Amino acid sequence: MAAVFDKPSLFKRTAPLFEGLDGPLAFAVFLLACAGLLIMYSSGYDHGTRFVDHGRNMAIAGVIMFVVAQIPPQRLMAFAVPLYTVGLALLVAVAIFGVTKKGARRWLNVGVVIQPSEILKIAMPLMLAWWFQKREGQMRPLDFMVAGVLLFVPVGLIMRQPDLGTSLLVLAAGMAVIFFAGLSWKLIAPPVLLGLLGVFLVVWFEPQLCADGMRWPVLHDYQQQRICTLLDPSRDPLGKGFHIIQGMIAIGSGGVFGKGFMAGTQTHLEFIPERTTDFIFAAFSEEFGLLGNLLLIAGFIFLILRGLTIAMEAPTLFSRLLAGALTMIFFTYAFVNMGMVSGILPVVGVPLPFISYGGTAMVTLGLAVGILMAIAKGKRLVQS
């Protein structure tokens, strides 16, 4: 009889909290985080406290991931409209009162300096998933038009700052929700074909379009220069082409097996610009070679496939759309970062998930993983 009143052990009391952690997803994130810590120790060895700060940022993101994983997906819907509204209001405040650094107005001083555009990476898929959940079973073309307005207003404000990298990530997250909601291929194909035609024309007429004094009406000067530098880095090898050239040299010099941990000459002789942030993939490639790159890419593929599996098995339309969009954020991060470092995409400020240094981006990634785990937990509770 006394056993009925025995106090449960600490393990039994805390076990339900860990049920929110999806095992395969947590394993993928853990492996990528270990790779990030390893290369951050090397590339940031003589770069102040980057390694310690990177570990701290990971710990904060881990706590956020654990806490968010305990929130039921249906309660996440309550945050959609307020978070989107606050994010949009802060973007307007940035346009009026923002802090300008290096020619870009992206930050807001509210006692501490914040970058409001980061909020939209999560707020945008939340808002659009909420919108389509409310329209489930009665979707019309007008609903997709409203979703487009909800998407392009903040994207336009972010591009105006200008911040091409963040606007690209927010646009990708929003378009993923709209696509997964059932947007017709008849509406998708024309802009895709138009974009491919534009790329072909730029490549074909590159000498004329990138000639001195030529200005493109739809892009800022720095964006035009990035595209022209991508097409021909040798036009300014010690200036704007330096990043791409040194990144490609580092990747190629790594060979199949790499130069070894802490042995990257391009990295430690400081030829690689931004070697702990945007161009950390070049440092990783130099030290761990093609084999290390394949393992890193395999880790991202596993993470993305697990996220898409969670999306497909989610019990509600809101959960499916949100999980699918957050997963595509990881894909966009990894694809754009590796592409720009490898010289196949223009250089934009997009970090490599769990690898690059950056507190705000790390927290955003931890929040995204936590939401995916919450959705996975919600699916298991429905099945039980």
Image (tube, rainbow, N blue to C red):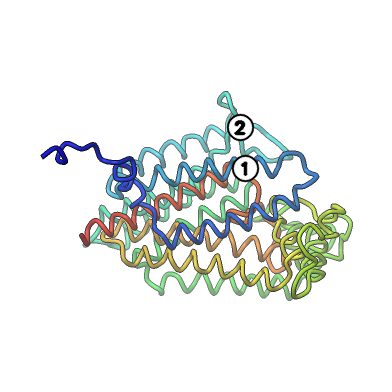
How far from the left and from the top, in percent, is residue 345? 68, 65
Q: Is residue 180 left or right of residue 166?
A: left
Residue on which disc 1 sits: 161
Q: Is residue 83 left or right of residue 299?
A: left
Question: The residue tagged with tag 1: helix, strand or loop?
Answer: loop
Q: Is residue 258 left or right of residue 90?
A: right
Question: Which circle's residue, 2 or 1, is located before the other in the chain?
Answer: 2
Alpha carbon of mark 2 to alpha carbon of mark 1: how far?
9 Å
* Badge 1 amino acid: Gln
Q: Which mark is residue 98?
A: 2
How far from the left and from the top, in percent, is residue 28? 50, 61
Which residue is found at the position 38% from the left and 48% from the top? Answer: 69
Disc 1: CA contacts within 10 A as few (<14), some (14-19) or many (>=20): many
Question: The residue tagged with tag 2: helix, strand or loop?
Answer: loop
Check the image and name the residue furthest to the left. Answer: 1
Quadrant containing the C terminus in the rendered view: bottom left
* Badge 2 amino acid: Gly
Which residue is found at the position 76% from the left and 60% from the top? Answer: 261
Closer to the camera in the image, 334 or 38: 38
Q: Quadrant of residue 245?
A: bottom right
Which residue is found at the position 42% from the left and 70% from the top? Answer: 187
Which residue is found at the position 63% from the left and 70% from the top? Answer: 198
Disc 2: CA contacts within 10 A as few (<14), some (14-19) or many (>=20): many
